[in-house]
Amino acid sequence: MSSANVRVPAKINLCLGVGPVRGDGYHPLATVYQAVDLHDEVRATVRDDEQITVTVHSDVDARSEVAIVPEDDDNLAVRAARLLRERTGSTQGVDLAIRKVIPVAGGMAGGSADAAASLVACNEVWGTGLSRQALEVLAARLGSDVPFLLHGGNAIGGGRGETVSPVLARGSYHWVFAMAHDGLSTKAVFAEFDRINAGRPVPDPVVPDALLAALRAGDAEALGSALSNDLTEAALSLRPELSDTLSIGIEAGALGAILSGSGPTALFLASDAEHSLDIAFALSSASGCADVVQSRGPVPGARLT
Ligand code: C5P
């Protein structure tokens, strides 16, 4: 096969517990991931030579920050293709075309999603035949969120985020995402977390029992109350205006409101489609919102289409 198309979702963290910084600069995490219906697509086309190229297209005019996605070897999708080639000894080249919908530097793992999609697409078009398990090993080397984006659904994340284990979960949830005008660097938010917590004891992170119980029961109201994010203080310290966005969604009756990962995307849980529309409408006039998107989760991980 000379080309393959892969659809890959964004992720949100229903809880994000962050522990004290480790010797390698990463933070231990205790998180529950959910893959949500906001997808990038990566098309891989085999080349006659050994080059690996990437182009990035965005359908979302309102968010201009797509310009900061590198179209060179720094692109995570290109790094994924190179890593797969290294691992398998393949010498084939590929053209990667990314259609971007997931916000860039938005705390929804957009770059990691493209890396996961690139692994699946290149493995297909190069015929390298690695199993999902083998791809997950490569994924963990590319970034903390990449293994989950292969997996999809709901999952508990441990380690620095790269270890993914199953969680008992029921239900489909209605989300509203408020995208900010400018992205936030994950690295900068973790550095701010360290600055704020210098001299304070930072406990080892845990997944709250209330959140696991809400997911087991498929209870949206209980899930809304149990949403949590230890990076909130750090992200709000760098971007104070995000607290206005969160307040607008809460006033509009969201069951819960938190920042997505390291932000700046804010996420709101709604009870049904109509409620989700009300919250989206309230947020659409907020000055800090570049775009408002209604979505559902969980959805599957990176898949050939
Ligand atoms: O793993 P990934 O490359 O996606 O992480 C981006 C940056 O976020 C890391 O370089 C690190 O500064 C920070 N990070 C962290 N602890 C984690 C995950 C990410 O400090 N568990």
Image (spheres, rainbow, N blue to C red):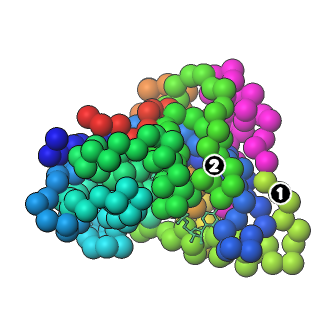
In the displayed structure, does residue 128 sit left or right of residue 54? right
* Residue identifier under label 2: 163
**Does residue 223 show up magenta in the picture?**
yes
Label 1 C-beta lies within 8 Å of the nearest ligand 1 atom: no
Q: Toward the viewer: 173 or 289? A: 173
Foreground: disc 1 or disc 2: 2
Question: Dot 2: what SS?
Answer: strand
Farthest residue to the left: give it: 48
* CA distance separating discs 1 and 2: 16 Å
Locate residue 71, reporting x and y percent.
Answer: 26, 70
Instruction: Tell me where residue 49 appears, x and y as whole percent.
Output: 14, 65
Image quadrant where one finds the N terminus: top left
Boundaries of the magenta span: 206-233
Image quarter in which the C terminus is found: top left
Determine whether the residue tagged by mark 1 lies in a helix, strand or loop: loop
Label 1 sits on residue? 204
Q: Is residue 177 visible?
A: no
- Indicate the amino acid at tag 1: Asp
Q: Earlier in the sequence, mark 1 or mark 2?
A: 2
Three-letter amino acid code at the position of disc 2: Thr
Residue in view at x 30 percent, y 37 percent:
304
| Tag of residue 296 | none
**Would you say residue 160 sits in the magenta stretch?**
no
User: How far across and down, in percent of the image, does residue 150 sit?
Assistant: 46, 43
Residue 22: tell me if it is visible: yes
Asked if disc 1 and disc 2 are in contact, CB closer than 8 Å, the reply is no
Q: Position of residue 179 (x, y in %)?
A: 43, 55
Q: How many marks?
A: 2
Please tell me whether residue 275 is drawn above or below residue 156 in the rendered image: above
Q: Is residue 10 above or below residue 270?
A: below
